[in-house]
Image (cartoon, rainbow, N blue to C red):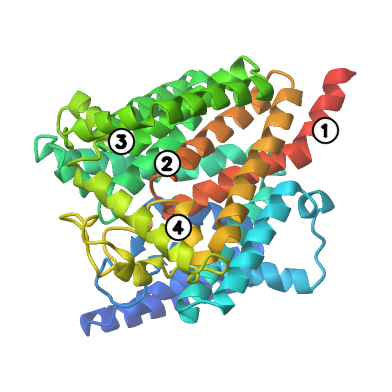
Amino acid sequence: MSRLFKTYWVYLFSFIFIGLNSYLVFNEFYYFAVIPFALVITFMAFFKLDKLMWFIVFATPLSLNLEELAIGGVGMYLPTEPLMFGVMLLYFIKLFKHTPINKGLIYHPVTIAIVLNLVWIFITSLTSSMPVVSFKFLLARLWFVVCFYFLATSLFKKITNYKVFFFAYLIPLSGVIIYAIIRLAGYNFEEKPAHWVMEPFYKDHTSYGAILAMYFPIILLFSGRSYTPVYKIFSYVLLGLFTLGIVLSYTRAAWVSLIGAFVLYLIYKFRIKFSVLALITGVFGIMLLLSWDSLVMNLERNNQDSSDNISEHVESISNVSTDASNLERLNRWSSAWRMFQERPIFGWGPGTYVFQYAPFQLSNETTIISTNAGENGNAHSEYIGPLAESGILGSLSFLLIILAVYYRGSITYHQLPKGELKSLLLATMLGLFTYVVHSLLNNYLDTDKASVPFWGFIALIVAIDIYHKKGLLDSHTK
């Protein structure tokens, strides 16, 4: 009788909602329909937080920027960033209730580096030329780090969750690739339309290509493992789709980043010692300095612009004489350097480069795509941008995060016995390294598209180091 009574109330409220929502839709009021979604999200936040996290990952490739939708004034991605903000608040509430944090995570070198970076961002937000912009930047960085570093590391205590994390992003991203390819086919696969066919999901081909490159080593991991036949076929389909997506993105930086990841793979595969790497780097540096003048002359002779022809497009990577994209990147870097020289310690404030760089452009360095309105991207580097925005420590603290990740990741990789976990760690470090290389030329960590995999990959590397390495090593040595 009690169960029948509960069912009755479920049906009653459902009919009331349907009737009321139908009336409101008829009167062109559509927001009432969001209530069931909001109730489900609230339930998940309090009782199924892991499921909510996976939903955020799934929604990330499909999220939409309010500014690009002309809703106006709010640079926020929906539905992901409001959800991350809510999850971050829940995390802090649990901290105030003295929920213990694993000491291994607290004292881990990567955690220390991340906290130092956040502290410096906070300090330079106080000294910022535009404090509101800087604190908004800090808040966004906080919800990315809290959700996909601190919370994600706890989720990766269950190591099989890495499959959920990866596929939750890969599946919707595959849909975006198919969508972009179909649109590009309508333009005969020309290079120019490839810059925007992935809109509104990704703002341009460079951010899109960067993420495709990040997940390429992960797909190679899945296609190379001995899973079920259906699983392997699915992985091969993804591999073909992502290969086609990367080629048709016409993103030169993504191609370069994959070459960098392959070089890193060889270093790990053949266990090349750091001393050998340092020697090779030193010799290469000396050769570069000795041949610098002739190298610059050769670069200036290259007048191959971006092209539909793949070989010509690759050749345009080194064109610093006529290629507008390359020249504009140099213009942004030069502007950032001059901003840094004026404020070398605290910078102009996190997130402020786009609003402050225009007066630092020189007329002889501007291009046909230069603007004073802060369009066409930011400082085009995750390393040079912080120099202008947070001074020398802003750039060094970010580099410290990267160094800490690969220091601990390399130690863990060489300690682990052969097997799934070792392959997983290597694929994750290679995927992350594509962004480390790509971020020399572009910067996207102010968006959910890049921040979710970037911090999530780091969290997985740290989780393997903290939670899974010791038990596997102990069992292997017995």
Q: In front: mark 1 or mark 4? A: 4
Crowd band around label 2 with a 10 angstrom C-alpha radius: few (<14), some (14–19), many (20+)? many
Q: How far apart are marks 2 and 3 (CA)?
A: 10 Å
Q: Circle 3 sits on which residue?
A: 252
Is residue 359 found left or right of 98 in the rendered image? left
Numbered tag placed on residue 438 in the rendering? 2
2 or 4: tag closer to the N-terminus: 4
- Residue receiving disc 4: 385
Query: Mark 3 is on which residue type?
Result: Arg
Of badges 2 and 4, nearer the viewer stands 4
The residue at which mark 1 appears reads as: 470
Please identify the quadrant where the N terminus is shown.
bottom right
For marks 1 and 2 on the same chain, the one whose residue lies earlier in the sequence: 2
Left or right? Give the position of 156 relative to 35: right
Say what amino acid the circle numbered 1 marks.
Lys
Residue 227 visible in the shown view = no
The foreground one among 126 and 101 is: 126
Label 3: few (<14), some or many (≥20) within 10 Å? many
